[in-house]
Image (cartoon, grey):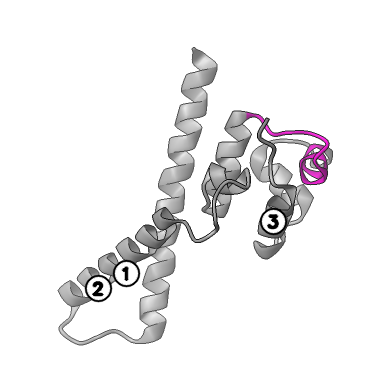
Amino acid sequence: MIRMNTNRLKELRKNAGLSQQELAGRLGIAASTMGMYEQGRRKPDYDTLIRLALIFHVTTDYLLGLEHPEAEWRKSEEELLEQLVKRDMSAASSRLASEEERRALMEELRAAVDSVLEKSCAAGLQEKNEA
């Protein structure tokens, strides 16, 4: 049986600056349930595991301890964001933007990707609940 890597979950939560209560609120579960996930006393269901992966920008395999944190898909995501920034910057101006502007654009792109992923996940959960 595959078990969730509780150390990774706790580390990801702390690195994101979230309390168990805050993360539980984002997941729509009780804080005590979140605590049990981190203690290994309870396992998240499939939908919760997917939402955790989306929140922390990791794969479900990583949460389950089956994958190294620097997975290829993550590197590809960063490369794609860099390409988008470069294309957008060159289209907007022939001069290179400041590092601060570049970082701001990267954060905007990440927020947009996060929003799309969260909406996609929510739509998938709604379809499942309606079935």
Residue position marked by numbered label 3 in the rendering: 13
Circle 1 sits on which residue?
82
Q: CA distance from mark 3 to mark 1?
A: 26 Å
Q: Secondary structure at mark 1?
A: helix
Compared across the picture, whether 8 is left or right of 90 comes to right
At label 1, the amino acid type is Glu
Q: CA distance from mark 1 to mark 2?
A: 6 Å
Tag 3, which secondary structure? helix
**Picture layout, residue 45 above or below residue 117:** above
In magenta stretch: residue 122: no
Residue range corresponding to the magenta coloring: 33-45
Q: Position of residue 77 (x, y in %)?
A: 37, 58
Quarter of the image with the N terminus is top right
For label 2, the residue is 86
Which residue is found at the position 55% from the left and 38% from the top? 50
Q: Mark 3, residues whose alpha carbon is within 10 Å: few (<14), some, or many (≥20)?
A: some
- Magenta run includes residue 38: yes
Is residue 17 in view? Answer: yes
Which residue does the image show at 50% across and 15% down from the upper left? 130
Q: Are marks 1 and 2 in contact (CB under 8 Å)?
A: yes
Residue name at image x 74 percent, y 48 percent: 6
* Contact flag, marks 2 and 3 (Cβ < 8 Å): no
Label 2 and label 3: CA atoms lie apart by 31 Å
Q: Position of residue 68 (x, y in %)?
A: 54, 56
